[in-house]
Amino acid sequence: MSKAFMTLMVVAVGVVAISLLAAGCPQTSTNDSTESGGGTVDTSIDWKDVELTDVRNGDKFTVNSLKGKTVVLENMAVWCTTCLSQQRQMEDALGELGDDVVFVSLDIDPNEKTGQLEDHVNRHGFDWAFAIDPNASVGPQLAAEYGINVLNPPSTPIILIDKDGNEKLLPLGRIKSSSDIVSEVESVS
């Protein structure tokens, strides 16, 4: 092959690569919203002020409305078997902790629907709040604050929020035992 042909090929490959990269990059915006899964996510509202609906009973709440109580927030998905194991540990911890602690499991899979989550809760008999991330509005903010792995349900992400609203991400990548959860809650109470 000639040197001119090789140079032309390198330039052509470079142009194609740059075009592909540019096509995959999100547009920057001056408003408080970001693109997520084909929709626009409003980030002008803090994730703790996003209205959630408990699929068990239809009660609406925000994380900030729970101030004065310690909140154990689990990011999960129905398909995640590790999440189910984590939820069994949460169930045990809930039995040991008082009424000043609220457990919330937040389904962050944008493909899962309320009915699927409700079936999951009923099938396993869980008795704490379970909600879907509405319009994928909480997940992107959590990822910006804690890193993308907080949106990976098998890494068992749990965020502990104390009575004053201070947050703490518990270690990722392992199931937290009921005694670990109880100890973490007691350390901030």
Image: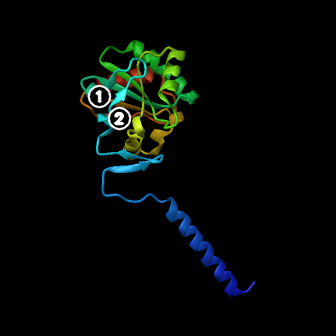
Amino acid type, residue under disc 2 in the picture:
Lys
Q: Whole-percent x and y of residue 66?
A: 28, 25
Q: CA distance from mark 2 to mark 1?
A: 8 Å
Colour mode of the rendering: rainbow
Whether residues under marks 2 and 1 lie with C-beta atoms below 8 angstroms apart, the answer is yes
Seen at 33% across and 14% down, the residue is: 98
Query: Residue tagged by mark 2?
Result: 168
Residue 170 lies, in percent from the top left, at 41, 33
Residue type at mark 1 is Asp
In the depicted structure, whether residue 66 falls above or below residue 13? above
Is disc 2 placed on a helix, strand or loop? strand
| Quadrant that contains the C terminus | top left
Residues packed near mark 2 inside 10 Å, few (<14), some (14 to 19) or many (20 plus): some
Q: Is residue 3 above or below residue 41?
A: below
Q: Which residue shows up at 47% across the image and 36% down it?
A: 172
Question: What is the x, y in percent for residue 137?
Answer: 38, 40
- Dot 1 lies on which element? loop
Residue for badge 1: 162
Note whether 163 is above or below 95 in the view shown.
below
Instruction: Say left or right for 77 vs 1.
Output: left
Packing grade of label 1 (10 A; few <14, some 14-19, many >=20) is many
Horizontal side of residue 63 vs 80, given as left or right? left
Q: Is residue 177 above or below residue 95?
A: below
Toward which corner of the image does residue 142 lie, by quadrant? top left
Q: Quadrant of residue 52?
A: top left
Front residue (pair 68, 65): 65
Q: Which mark is residue 107?
A: none
Location of the N terminus by quadrant is bottom right
The residue at the point 33 percent across, 38 percent down is: 47
In depth, the one of 177 and 122 nearer the eye is 122
